[in-house]
Image (spheres, coloured by chain):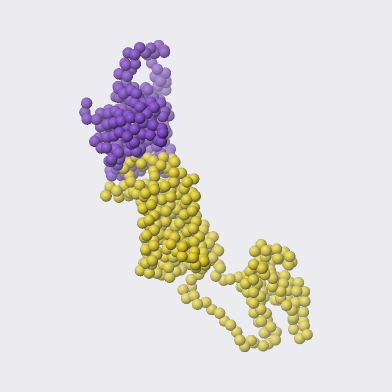
Chain colours: A purple, B yellow
């Protein structure tokens, strides 16, 4: 395994008495997709925000590509791209204008149309983000996170609230980004999404990582413990039926 | 360092474009100051020629009294309110400040006396709250009657008075109030704009999104300030055009000096708005603080009332408000033709405030 691009060692975060993140440790190799799973309030978003330099780290160390986040948060911000769970953009600005301005914040010039093409929004270059559909907005949000060609991309629940077509489309986009060599860390509530996209999965609960492995190995381990599914395994899922009936074409 | 200003320039372009696509914002920054200009221009523009609103109650039937009433009507000093014919109605109107004074001619007014000339006494009523008005109206009537008396008796008075204005520049009271109105609109643009928009954009998450980039708060504040200055220039230009063409404003000073000084003032005041708006987590937190900060300046910095009318101790305090050197300086440039070399104290005070305000604004700014 190559040198990890992200190393989290015993990271802690508490708000008063409440412990949000309770000593979390993991590593991510370059080019991998890591999924962080867990029920609401498990500490997923707080963990991400500590890595992104948005929250103070109360304990432990986090290194991103050799940079200590606690010591140089601005240095980390330069090499990571972040898509926030509830991102909004200035109103009355076109997508192309926003991309140019965001690139300038990193000191870089970009071809906004080429970037919009990458996320299938080239025809929306002159639209305002407030007029986009949910799926388009998430794709634009990812485009903004890519303006400075980051080494590491963070996606916080990128497919929440999207219809199946938009979700499949976003998965294709994430795979494409991974192919270009970007390491991706995402949180999700959809197990299917984690299984399809992630090389590694971390399952969090109550501020701790309770399992960390590849999806296949996690499932194998469960079966070894003697787990029996409640229902007979079907050859196809209801989602397969839905996609088969309504097609894969995007609706936005 | 080049990257620092590159980001500022692109962000300024973005924020300016966005601003000009927002019709409500344009309305508030351009038409709102103009509305104020019309209201106050209308109020103060005419106050140059003093006049009194009076009711004339003529209880006499004589020809002389009719002539006298029409003589009062022709006077430029009196504005006779027609339709008020009885004393009780007139008194009620005077209580409501619709009238300054009442002139009553008693039934016997103008009837020939012992000397076969029209005799009589004019009664003047005035409100207890303004005895000066009563005296002024009475003495004007006295002088009108003096003229009539001279004609009737054919004696020309040996001693007379003639008055003329010493105002050499021809300054009108509008010229004087205009710099105050400019100061007021700088206050409005610089404080109420950012105080409303910044917390709102924290709530939508648009500002929070910038927090994950390496953008420094000072870069954002400077871009925001520059984009607002452009709109400020537009707003002040519109005010200037209206003042010049509709209110016949006389510009004594140099336009470049005026523009640079107004911009400096706008930069200072804008720092207050972006400091409060950048500090506040939401609009509800921003409103009270912005009112506390802006109200004293709005009334004590000489925008609407000259500062010399205030008690001395208050003048000493209000001299140090950030808006005071702006209004004073603009007035000196606009009405006295002063230039930067004459404005040393104002420039120094403004510079000190600018440093304090921006140091605080950079420090208290938060993205969410």
- From the viewer's perspective, is B302 left or right of A192? right
Q: Residue at x 40, y 11 (%)?
A: A232
Q: Quadrant of the C terminus of chain B?
A: top left
Question: From this viewpoint, which residue is outermost toward the front?
Answer: A17
- Image location of residue A146, percent across then percent down: 31, 36
Work out whether B79 lies above or below A132.
below
Name which residue lies at 76% across and 86% down. B115
Q: Is residue A217 left or right of residue B306?
A: left
Q: Nearer the viewer, residue B258 or A20?
A: A20
Above/below status of A49 relative to B98: above
Q: How many marks?
A: 0
* Quadrant in which residue A28 is drawn: top left
Q: Residue furthest left?
A: A2
| Viewer can see residue A93 | no
Residue at x 44%, y 69% (from the top left corner): B335
Residue B87, quarter of the rendered image? bottom right
- Residue A166: % across, % down: 39, 28
Percent position of residue B83, x then y: 70, 65
Relative image position of residue A76 (x, y in whole percent):
28, 38
User: Which residue is pictured at 75% across the width and 74% down the height?
Assistant: B106
Residue A163's place in the image compared with B265, above or below, is above
């Amino acid at each position: 395994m190559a040198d990890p691009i992200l190393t989290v060692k015993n990271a802690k975060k508490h708000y008063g008495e409440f412990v949000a993140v309770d000593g979390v440790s993991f590593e991510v190799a370059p080019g991998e997709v890591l999924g962080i799973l867990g029920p609401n309030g498990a500490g997923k978003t707080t963990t991400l925000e500590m890595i992104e330099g948005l929250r103070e780290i109360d304990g432990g160390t986090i290194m991103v590509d050799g940079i200590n986040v606690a010591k140089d948060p601005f240095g980390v911000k330069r090499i990571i791209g972040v898509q926030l769970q509830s991102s909004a953009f200035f109103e009355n600005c076109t997508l192309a204008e926003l991309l140019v301005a965001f690139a300038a914040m990193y000191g870089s010039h970009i071809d906004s149309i080429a970037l919009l093409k990458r996320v299938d929004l080239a025809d929306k270059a002159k639209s305002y983000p407030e007029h986009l559909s949910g799926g388009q907005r998430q794709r634009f949000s990812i485009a903004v996170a890519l303006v400075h060609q980051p080494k590491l991309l963070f996606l916080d629940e990128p497919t929440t609230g999207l219809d199946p077509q938009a979700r499949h489309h976003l998965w294709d986009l994430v795979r494409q980004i991974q192919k270009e060599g970007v390491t991706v860390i995402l949180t999700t509530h959809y197990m299917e999404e984690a299984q399809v996209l992630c090389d590694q999965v971390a399952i969090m609960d109550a501020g701790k990582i309770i399992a960390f492995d590849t999806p296949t190995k996690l499932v194998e381990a469960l079966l070894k413990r003697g787990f029996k599914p409640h229902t007979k395994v079907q050859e196809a899922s209801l989602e397969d039926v839905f996609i088969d009936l309504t097609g894969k074409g995007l609706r936005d | 360092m080049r990257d620092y200003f590159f980001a500022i320039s692109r962000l300024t372009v973005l924020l300016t474009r966005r601003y000009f696509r927002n019709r409500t914002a344009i309305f508030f920054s351009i038409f709102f100051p103009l509305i104020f200009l019309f209201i106050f221009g209308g109020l103060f523009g005419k106050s140059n020629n003093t006049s009194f609103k009076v009711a004339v109650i003529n209880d006499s039937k004589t020809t002389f009294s009719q002539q006298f009433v029409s003589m009062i009507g022709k006077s430029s000093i009196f504005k006779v309110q027609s339709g008020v014919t009885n004393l009780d109605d007139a008194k009620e109107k005077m209580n409501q400040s619709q009238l300054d004074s009442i002139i009553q001619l008693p039934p016997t007014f103008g009837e020939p006396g012992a000397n076969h000339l029209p005799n009589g006494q004019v009664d003047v009523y005035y409100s207890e709250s303004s005895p000066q008005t009563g005296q002024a109206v009475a003495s004007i009537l006295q002088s009108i009657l003096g003229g009539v008396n001279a004609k009737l008796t054919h004696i020309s008075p040996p001693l007379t008075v003639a008055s003329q204005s010493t105002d050499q520049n021809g300054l009108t009271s509008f010229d004087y109030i205009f710099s105050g109105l400019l100061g007021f609109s700088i206050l409005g643009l610089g404080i109420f704009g950012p105080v409303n928009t910044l917390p709102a954009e924290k709530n939508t998450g648009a500002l929070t999104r910038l927090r994950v980039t390496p953008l420094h708060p000072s870069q954002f504040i400077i871009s925001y300030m520059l984009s607002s200055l452009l709109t400020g220039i537009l707003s002040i230009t519109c005010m200037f055009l209206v003042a010049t063409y509709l209110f016949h404003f006389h510009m004594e000073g140099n336009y470049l000096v005026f523009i640079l000084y107004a911009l400096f003032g706008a930069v200072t005041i804008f720092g207050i708005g972006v400091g409060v708006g950048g500090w506040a987590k939401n609009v509800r937190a921003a409103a009270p603080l912005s009112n506390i900060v802006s109200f004293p300046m709005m009334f004590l910095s000489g925008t609407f009332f000259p500062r010399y009318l205030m008690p001395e101790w208050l003048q000493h305090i209000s001299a140090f408000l950030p808006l005071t050197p702006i209004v004073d300086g603009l007035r000196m440039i606009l009405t006295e033709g002063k230039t930067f070399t004459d404005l040393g104290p104002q420039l120094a005070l403004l510079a000190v405030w600018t440093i304090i305000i921006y140091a605080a604004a950079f420090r208290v700014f938060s993205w969410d």
